[in-house]
Image: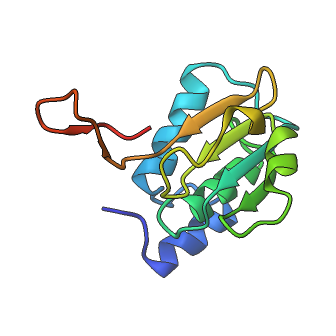
Amino acid sequence: MDGFHPENIGRMIMGEAEAFIPATPYGIMLLLEHNNIATKGKHAVVLGRSNIVGRPMSILLSNNTNPGNCTVTVCHSRTQNLNEICSQADIIVAAIGQPEFLKADMVKEGAVVIDVGITRLEDASKKSGLQAGR
């Protein structure tokens, strides 16, 4: 069950308990909850607007729930002033599909960063020639 059916997405947007939450966004919400990350009133930036992670993540973070209750900005690779927007975020969820897109100078001190990246990168020092994405 992926939770992507239009009826289910509608339920998620409405905050209904019967909604099935897509796996990766749900896992991120559990990660925030498990680690007692304060989200209420925080500025969250979601890098990526995919229907699989970015959009559901923005909805979940903005819902009147705990974790949640964030002010959410959704950004993508064409967003203007991206460095400035990210540097104001308390929470950044990077799901943009480009390895090493988010740089250290884009993150303010103390911000929580969750990287959803799954891209493999070349690495000659590894037997496989690849390393897990960052």
Res. 23 in view: yes
**Percent position of residue 58, x then y:** 68, 57
Please state the horizontal and vertical placement of residue 48, each as a whole percent of the image. 60, 61
- The quadrant in which the N terminus is found is bottom left
Residue drawn at x 83%, y 39% as measured from the top left: 87
x, y percent for residue 107: 75, 34
Q: Is residue 40 left or right of residue 124?
A: right
Q: x, y (%) of residue 23? A: 40, 51
- Above or below residue 34? Residue 6 is below
Say whether residue 56 is left or right of residue 62.
Answer: left
Question: Which residue ends up furthest to the left in the rendered image?
Answer: 127
- Quarter of the figure that contains the C terminus: top left
Q: Establish if 84 lies above or below 40.
A: below
The image quarter containing residue 89 is: top right
Name, please, the residue furthest toward the front: 124
Task: Tell me if residue 59 comes above or below residue 110 in the rendering.
Answer: below
Name the residue: 31% across, 46% down: 120
Which residue is at a point 48% across and 55% down the rendered structure image? 21
* Residue 63 shows up from this direction: no
